Image (cartoon, rainbow, N blue to C red):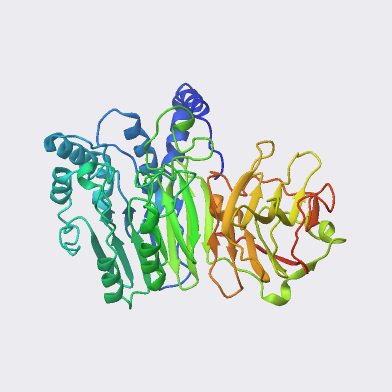
Amino acid sequence: MPTSPSRRDFLKTTSTLALLGAGAGTSVAAAETAPLPALLPRDSQGRHFVFYADCCSGIAGTGNEQNHAAVNRVVARLQPGPEFIAFPGDAVMGYLTDPAPLRQQWDYWWNTEMAWLHPRGIPLYQSTSNHNTYDLASEEVFRQVHPHLPQNGPEGQRGLAYAVRNGNLLYVSTHQPDRTRPDRSTLVMETAWLDQILTQHADARYKFVCGHYPVFPVNGYFQSPQWCFRPAEREPFWEVLVKHQVHAYLCSHILAFDVQIHRGIPQILSGGAGTQGAGPLALMPARSEYLHCVEMAVDDQGLRCQTRGVDGRVRETLTWPCPFPASPAWQRLTPTDCTAQLSSLKPAGKIVAFRASTGPVRVDPAGTPQTLLWGWDSMEGLATVWIGWEGTPLRLTVRLIPQSGFGWQVWSGPVVPLGVPWTGEVALHPGLGPGGVLWRPTANAPWQSLSTTSSKGLEDLTWPRYWNIGHGHSGADEWPCLAPALEIDWTHADLPSHA
């Protein structure tokens, strides 16, 4: 994700503004209250809302409270205002053994920090989370301070999990407490109730499922259940979302903004509502993440979202599904013209896709990686873009240098079967951050983000000047593709504009 100003630069800037005098202060205040044009649907049936979470506040005078107020000011400036706010958890700091001070945190959060929302009549759908609900007592407090939430969750989770039907939109919030604690370690993600609710509301034009934790790891935070779902829980939960073709799964917990695509369904994470420490791990990580809210708009053409930082500026945009030209628009790459075709491309604002096919796949006994496509620059020691097969078992793999001079980051894909022909498509989508390295086996299959620990995608990648097919830049003996009849086609599409 794009790099935000450092904490030192931010403090320096705000301190300077405070010293500029009353005139400058007036202009700054005016800029901070000026209306911001909201992201709206493209047809009359569409819906729009705001999605943000994770401020760990409810305590006066803290840095988190100040950060949360800065994000709230941006949300308050949106015109028209959102139809509702999705807030998947960690509103308060919590983790108290006495329910009384926990209630005080909730009271301060609702009636002081979120007081600006009350006269606007905008519903806020809060979710359970590790800071909100970490034991039985905190779950009971959550129920008490959210009596307005529907009491239609599964047995034992009434007032914790719920579903809201709002006209043609269904919003489902799942119960996801802290499962690292001994008294919650055996709790599993509820899928039967989720499937039942989605079945009952099959006629809903737009469907969103929400929960605090990402199903799939984000920015390298793989430890489960601390940072994400347990591996065995991911596919059963996601299968329900795919079955009912929900528009997105919304989550938080990681202090970041992240989008991944799994079997065609986006996992969208927003953890920028105010929680922030100090140093490189002030966010996760501070090098690439920032405080923000997310505007969401859905219509019959698909889903759009954009983030706004605390200055109100749009930082990232996304439209899903993404457009790709039909097959006739794909062009064949050859060893003699691949550099001429690809090096002239200006990838900023473009989605680039490659389709590769080979004869029967063979493995190198020495375990040497096999190259499908190698993009390089003489000033980088490694390939800037490498698409190929490697590992045991052999897997589709993409290696990128997301930021010049910082070395390779790796994206891992599916196992490549041996002894049979192989075909697949790889897309490089700069609007999806680390989730923007996508693959699918055929043009009719849904896109899937490859797995990575990187916190950056293609947004700052320096596009290669030179390209090779089937081997590295040192010659035919460098990481050669051993499968016969390698063919590669390519195409590109403009990133859709939200203007």
| The quarter of the displayed image where residue 447 is located | bottom right
Q: Position of residue 165 (x, y in %)?
A: 27, 69
Q: Position of residue 322 (x, y in %)?
A: 57, 65
494 lies above or below 73: below
Camera-side residue of 163 and 98: 98
Instruction: Name the residue rendered at 15%, 51% in the picture.
Output: 143
Horizontal side of residue 116 vs 71, given as left or right: left
| The quarter of the displayed image where residue 227 is located | top left
Image quadrant holding the C terminus, namely bottom right
Camera-side residue of 496 and 227: 227
Instruction: Name the residue rendered at 49%, 35% in the picture.
Output: 286
89 lies above or below 64: below
Horizontal side of residue 332 vs 369, given as left or right: right
Q: How many labels were placed on the picture?
A: 0
Mark yes or no: residue 344 visible: no
Taking the view exactly as shown, the residue that stands out farthest to the front is 365
Mark yes or no: residue 113 visible: yes
Taking the view exactly as shown, the residue that stands out farthest to the top is 19
Horizontal side of residue 454 vs 148, given as left or right: right
Camera-side residue of 190 and 365: 365
Q: Position of residue 149 (x, y in %)?
A: 19, 58
Q: Position of residue 492 (x, y in %)?
A: 69, 64
Horizontal side of residue 250 vs 162, given as left or right: right
Instruction: Name the residue rendered at 24%, 41% in the picture.
Output: 181
Image quadrant holding the N terminus, namely top right
Camera-side residue of 177 and 16: 177
